[in-house]
Image: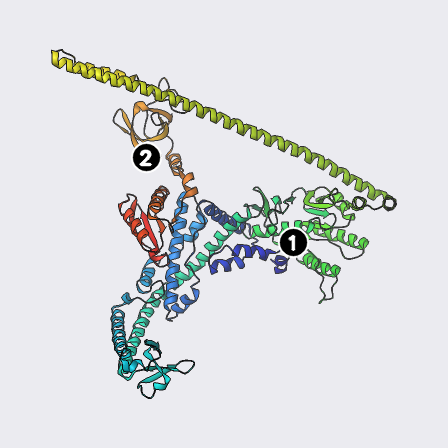
Amino acid sequence: MDDKILHTLEYRKILDKCAAYTQTSMGREAAESLKPDTDLESVKRLLQATDEAYTVDRLKGNPSFGGITDIAAPLKRARIGGTLSPHELLAIGNTVNGSRRIKRFIANVHEDEPIPLLEGISENLSEQKALEDAIKACIDESAEVLDSASPGLAQVRRELRSGEVRIREKLDSMIRSSSVAKMLQDQLITIRGDRFVIPVKAEYRSYFGGIVHDQSGSGATLFIEPESIVAMNNKLRETRMKEEREIEIILQKLTALVGDQADLLLLDIDLLGQLDFIFAKGRLAHVMKASQPRMNDRGYLKLKKGRHPLIDMEKVVPIDVELGNSYTSIIVTGPNTGGKTVTLKTIGLLSLMAMSGLFVPAEEGSQLCVFDAIYADIGDEQSIEQSLSTFSSHMTNIIRILNHMTPKSLVLLDEVGAGTDPAEGSALAISILEHIHSLGCRMVATTHYSELKAYAYERKGVINASMEFDVNTLSPTYRLLVGVPGRSNAFAIAERLGLPHVILDYARGEVKEEDQRVEHMIASLEENRLGAESEREKAEKLRQEMEQLRSRHQQELEKLEEQRDRLIEKARGEAKEVIAKARREAEQIIADLRQLAKEEGASVKEHKLIAARRQLDEAEPQQRKKGAAKPKAKAPRQIEPGDEVMVYSLNQKGHVVELSGAKEAVVQLGIMKMKVSLDDLELVNANKPAEKQVQRHATTVKRTRDDNIRSELDLRGANLEEALIEVDRFIDEAFLGNLGQVYLIHGKGTGILRQGISEYLRKHKHIKSYRLGNYGEGGTGVTVVELK
């Protein structure tokens, strides 16, 4: 695609908007280098990837690419044997950790909502846990090599600390001496050039031995290393050199590990950049309220309420355009400032966005075409340096377009033939448009010339269009009207502004009768259109009122049903109280009878007392379930494993897993299995094929979970009691959401919150294990929880 065209249609500004939502330098680079694709299948794949990212963003939010950086340069240096610095190794470790985190996130989402393209990309990310652990064991979050990186380094650093302590003790005893203290500017110990020194007043230099390493800016203070610690400082320096050698050995070993995996890691950062860019496209689609267009390669374009993406959504006027079916060329006529140029740019820019795999700001059902090229001559491109007039500049662009266009191209021409004599300009415009149209290109052109209205009316496959103008307010509405040619509105505007009627009448007399008939025809068309639009608005208003009435009636019906249920529940409660009272009285009577039988030797049978109690129990009214159960068939089919059944006591549908004896069955109700009496079951559907059952299970309680599930909980600022309540709710949601791992962010602080959460997690039944965060995960400010 020609860069000049991309500049004309402001394509770069869209890329900048997309790049703003990337999180890594690799993703930003991918966004900034994006170009439209001319292959239909490639464009469909790009749009599918954007659609998957849009879905993930809607359900779970975009994943965090924190800690992931462009490590290509250190990887290439490690591959050729160069030694990497601790900072570079830390960046590699953080990127490896971030890669694993992104891969796990996408895999978890894919289990609930299929995202095959994103899952396929993330599946190619390599697992470098061993390398990450090796770097973590040697380098801390501040990019300092740990003492535990090697036994040799640990020994050397113990010697360093011991030597520093001896030197400080020696100097402390010296500066506390009264004879030395009077010669010091300050009683402190400092370091110059890795050697311990003390600040001595310049006038005592001749009385104070040792080596001068530095002096103050005024020269009043000399930083002197006393002779008594010179040997000790020398020993300390030798120890530091040993430390540097040990660190160099450790860095070389880690670099060698990185070098062995450099090719895989280079591929990983490329894939991570792609994923970051794809998720940025999904976020941009959300922000722009854009939708996925249907794509074709047969030159068909249909925009429903298409909006220019660089104009404020509150101010932009949507356009409806169809091209490539009944007509292949649109000629837009009308005065300036009506929005013709914006319409051209909207059509061109949305086509470029779709061909780049970006969603377009238009309603669902919009269709766009994959053109082999888009050509545009838009705006006044007069060039002083090239001594070209406006007309010459336009002609130069049009000639270049004519030389390169094909039947599969989209051509956008603004004010074709302008800048020269009207008669010659209109004739030239008609000739150019006829040539482009006859070649089979898709074309949208704007013009001032009224002669082109007749051309569009007479030519098959070409249609007139105009930008609506409100004569009452003397302002454009920026709405595109396809099928209606533009009116000049000059007389109407002049009359509204107060031009004398004598002048207006004379001017009308100078207009050709044929032109007047055309104007009257256009006015009639516009009047009919406004009438039809008014009727449509009335019908739409009636439809909305009917919808509101239906919604209100539905709410009233639900309210009545709710009131009925409350009354039934109240009556049921009262009935239970009456029965409970009767049961208590009956129990008392039975107890009295037993006592009487013992005292008088009466022979009251125990089983008769039990039977009487059962009759009393059965007198309790059964609770009526909401939604009456279906009556049982006269000859019910025997229930078998796999059947869908209704459990009356729970008012729930489930599937029979297996029969348990002659009177019970094991029933799957959502995520629970339970034994239920066969008398409590009614057959709803016979045994379905296994695939359908699996499909049903796969959708169980998914919807509500997906909309709210998070993988991180920020508890900073909360007290322990509040935090534990939030953690309990969050762990339950994560467990139901089948998340394998979640992050509790409690901060470092005093540690009270961390300890309280740790104690709570130790007793929780859903917790498999927990640990403090690693570098790149927040360290001791984060607890990483693995769920069962």
Q: Amino acid at mark 1?
A: Thr
> Which residue position is annotated with label 1?
406
Residue 569 appears left or right of 676: right
Q: Residue furthest bottom?
A: 206
Identity of the residue drawn at 55% across and 50% down: 40
Q: Measured from the top left, where is residue 37 in percent x and y?
A: 56, 54
Front-lying residue, 615 or 689: 615
Q: Measured from the top left, where is residue 531 in percent x and y?
A: 71, 34
Q: Is residue 486 visible?
A: yes
Q: Secondary structure at mark 2?
A: strand
Color scheme of the displayed model: rainbow
Identity of the residue drawn at 63% across and 50% down: 346
Q: Measured from the top left, where is residue 352 in percent x and y?
A: 59, 52
Q: Amino acid at mark 2?
A: Met
Residue 541 picture quarter: top right
> Which residue position is annotated with label 2?
672
Q: Is residue 464 visible?
A: no
Tell me which label, 1 or 2, sits earlier in the chain: 1
Front-lying residue, 71 or 780: 780
Identity of the residue drawn at 74% across and 64% down: 388
Closer mark to the observer between disc 1 and disc 2: 2
Residue 672 picture quarter: top left
Front-lying residue, 95 or 371: 95
Above or below, 601 against 545 in this view is above
